[in-house]
Image (cartoon, rainbow, N blue to C red):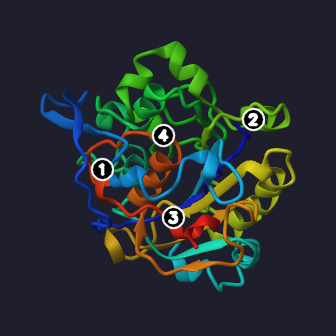
Amino acid sequence: MAAAIAIIVLIGDNSNKNMQSTSSAISASTSLNTVSSTTSVSVALSTSSSASTSSIPPPSTQGNGTIRHVLIIVIENIEYSNVIGDRSAPYENNLTGTYALATNYFAVSHPSEPNYIAMIAGSTLNITNDGSVSQNQRLVTNLADLFKAKNVSWRAYEESMPIPCDANDSSDGLYVTKHDPFVYMADITNNLTYCKSHIVNLTRFYDDLANNQLPQYAFITPNIKNDGHDGGVASADGWLSTFIPKIINSGSFNSSVVFLTYDEGTTALGGGGHVATIVIGPSSIVKPGFKSSVAYSHYSLLATIESIYGLDNLGRNDANATTMNDMFVNAG
């Protein structure tokens, strides 16, 4: 099978809309306790015949190309109107002329942390704050479990993370766990060897890219100065203008898709604000200059990843979310 990469950059979104319903069969149901409480959380894994895996064809038939790698980049706390059409974000606006833009994408909650959790758990898991790992960690099925079940490789790249699998904010304040959802998943951190090989510093990304060793899924988090949290839209746009070209100019790009999104906006629209989400990839996979008005959310992004790799869903909000199939060439 030809190799292909999907890169997803996330820019804060909040939307609890029901998108595309499904009547898939339940293949497994598990009740797991949260780490921070004794309340059980019911988890259902549905088969790949569900809505989240039916809208987008298998990786080998995506447009005229294939998708082997999905890269997600998450930027912070900026409303759509302060990015798209704003002179403070020239690079991102330039991207929208070349690649595809979701114009009706929403974050699902406030503050930041629940949105990051939603991206990999299909739910905020009743988290309503930016709590520490010790406070908000959960033992529930998550995207990493779906990957493991289908042998899909993955890695989270965290800029300024002091050591792999670090579940504490860095002393310099640049790495914050609230922007690293995978350390909130207890089944990952409970296996330290596994965790250290999958949650790493962003410097590892540059090595993996240069050596053609990118995993099939990469979750990329800039540090708090580069993601717009502290520096605003101009700072984030400047960082993206140096980071994304490394991907576009790499040998992997012809088989790649990038989703660039924000974790949340500054309004309550959709639950977490109206946010910009740009889908970047070769013209054989992503529609050039396309503008989608379909209502999407972080759950749509998760459902799209599940669809691309033929994964089960988590039986939460991802199960009924609309996949972002209109952004791709083969959608017509």
Of 223 and 13, the residue lying toward us: 13
Inspect the image, locate mark 1, and give the three-letter code of the amino acid beneath it: Ser
Residue 128 visible at all? no
Q: Earlier in the sequence, mark 3 or mark 2?
A: 2
User: Could you say which disc has been placed on residue 203 in the image?
Assistant: 2
User: Could you say which disc has been placed on residue 123 in the image?
Assistant: 1
Q: Is residue 28 left or right of residue 111?
A: left
User: Residue under circle 3?
Assistant: 325
User: Residue under circle 4?
Assistant: 177
Q: Is residue 207 left or right of residue 287?
A: right
Of 123 and 312, the residue lying toward us: 312
Q: CA distance from mark 3 to mark 1?
A: 21 Å
| Number of marks in the rendered image | 4
Q: Residues within 10 Å of mark 2 (few under 14, many from 20)?
A: few
Q: Do the numbered discs 3 and 1 sit on residues whose CB atoms are within 8 Å?
A: no
- The residue drawn where x is 22% and y is 38% is 26
Foreground label between 1 and 2: 1
- The residue drawn where x is 32% and y is 39% is 47
User: Looking at the image, is 89 positioned above or below residue 1?
Assistant: below
Q: Earlier in the sequence, mark 4 or mark 1?
A: 1
Q: Residues within 10 Å of mark 1 (few under 14, many from 20)?
A: many
Question: SS for tag 1?
Answer: loop
Q: Do the numbered discs 2 and 4 sit on residues whose CB atoms are within 8 Å?
A: no
Inspect the image, locate mark 3, and give the three-letter code of the amino acid beneath it: Asn
Where residue 52 sits: x, y (%)?
Answer: 38, 53
